[in-house]
Image (spheres, rainbow, N blue to C red):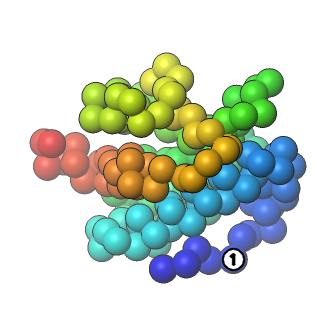
Amino acid sequence: MTAPPLPREVSRAFGALPAPIGKRLLQVRELIFATAAAHDAVGRLTETLKWGEPAYLTEETGSGSTIRLGRVKGCETHAAVLFNCKTTLVETFRDRLPDAFEYRQNRALLLSVAGALPKRPLSICLSLALTYHLDRKAGR
């Protein structure tokens, strides 16, 4: 599945980022939609802005936790995929994929803007976020 057209306000947010970060995060956006499409229980995503950053919500089904795309202040070499700090998501990513990413506290994983997008480990993280509430209900 390809991602739907960018909503105007979300497109502006991507456009306001430094070009290498914006390009990397647009690749992440594609992967978010592809990952969501692979899970029937996730449903259609809501794409909006949260704190001025592109955000992806599972409003239709409530299956997951919000994913935001942004940057680390003062850092031009990495893009940030941000998660709700009140979840155990980043802790889980760190446990399962300790060397796949640089992590920031319990909030974010950082992606280098250089090189290939680490699709496989990133899709695992995105899948866990998009199904977070389903997994919690199932006791996983």
Q: Quadrant of residue 92?
A: top left
Q: Residue at x 48, y 80 (%)?
A: 1
Is residue 130 in view? no
At which x and y percent is residue 61? 37, 64
Amino acid under label 1?
Pro
Q: Quadrant of residue 106?
A: top left
Front residue of this view, candidates 118 and 84:
118
At which x and y percent is residue 70? 68, 41
- In this view, the residue farthest toward the top is 105
From the viewer's perspective, is 41 left or right of 20? left
Is residue 104 in view? yes
Q: Secondary structure at mark 1?
A: loop
Q: Which residue is mark 1?
A: 5
Q: Quadrant of the C terminus?
A: top left
Relative to 109, does residue 39 appear above or below in the rendering? below
Q: Residues within 10 Å of mark 1 (few under 14, many from 20)?
A: few
At which x and y percent is residue 47? 61, 62
From the viewer's perspective, is 86 left or right of 135? right
Q: Residue at x 67, y 44 (%)?
A: 114
Q: Quadrant of residue 88?
A: top left
Q: Residue at x 58, y 40 (%)?
A: 111
From the viewer's perspective, is 101 left or right of 125? right
- In this view, the residue farthest toward the front is 115
The total number of labels drawn is 1
Front residue of this view, candidates 8 and 70:
70
Q: Residue at x 34, y 71 (%)?
A: 38
